[in-house]
Amino acid sequence: MTPSYVGAPRSALGPAHPLTLRARAGLLEMLPAADVVTEEGGALLALPSECERFLGADHTVTLGARHNHAWALYLLGRFEEADRGIRQVAEAYVRRFGPEYPVVLAARQLLSRTRAALGHLEEGIAVMTDVVERRERGLGPEHPFTVASRHLLDAYRAGRSRP
């Protein structure tokens, strides 16, 4: 699956081109769902450091790759690694975009998931409460992202660390 999606941009643009790296970064979040355990899957898990080397630590493609990497680690049950990664990404996003920006809220929602999965449910609730409040103000109470965030918060309040 993976090589057919990434091979064409890689050969046409080169492995260090921002569009090639962005395409590969998008695949990171799909690895666990696709059950990719091949060599290419392992190479994709190493992608954030490759993006940083070619594009810099605060480039949007690098941050996106690190965000997707943290999501993949979370889905694989590697909560401590995911927590460290998404915490750094969320902080970088806030510095770059401000606390209300949608990708910041997505990163903070993942941070709430990792905190809860690691047994820090109260911290997960606090982070998720902030995300829900910001989404309600920015998107409205009925927006699908707001509704999904509220559902996660309700699950935490019911004592479930993973809905």
Image: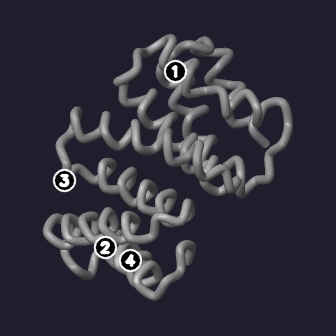
Q: Position of residue 52 (x, y in %)?
A: 48, 18
For marks 1 and 3 on the same chain, the one whose residue lies earlier in the sequence: 1
Dot placed on the residue nearer the N-terminal end, 1 or 4: 1
Relative vertical location of residue 128 with respect to residue 106 in this rendering, above or below:
below
Few, some or many C-alpha atoms within 10 Å of disc 4 (few <14, some 14-19, many ≥20)? many
Alpha carbon separation for disc pair 1 and 2? 31 Å
Q: Amino acid at mark 4?
A: Leu
Label 1: state its secondary structure: helix
Real-space Cα separation, disc 2 to disc 4, in angstroms: 10 Å
Quadrant of the rendering where the C terminus is positioned? bottom right
Q: CA distance from mark 1 to mark 4?
A: 33 Å
Circle 1 crowding by C-alpha within 10 Å: few under 14, some 14–19, many from 20:
many
Residue occupying the point 35% across, 24% down:
58
The single residue placed furthest to the right in the displayed view is 38
Of the residues under marks 2 and 4, which one precedes in the sequence? 2
- Residue under numbered circle 2: 146
Dot 2 lies on which element? Answer: helix
What residue is pinned by disc 4? 153
Question: Against 159, is 17 above or below?
Answer: above
- Whole-Å distance between the Cαs marked 2 and 3? 13 Å
Q: CA distance from mark 1 to mark 3?
A: 25 Å
Residue at horizontal 46%, vertical 64%? 120
User: Which residue in the structure is indicated by mark 3?
Assistant: 100
Determine contact: label 2, label 4, CB under 8 Å: no
Amino acid carrying mark 1 in the image: Cys
Q: Residue at x 71, y 57 (%)?
A: 33
Closest to the camera, between mark 2 and mark 4, is 4
Circle on res. 51: 1
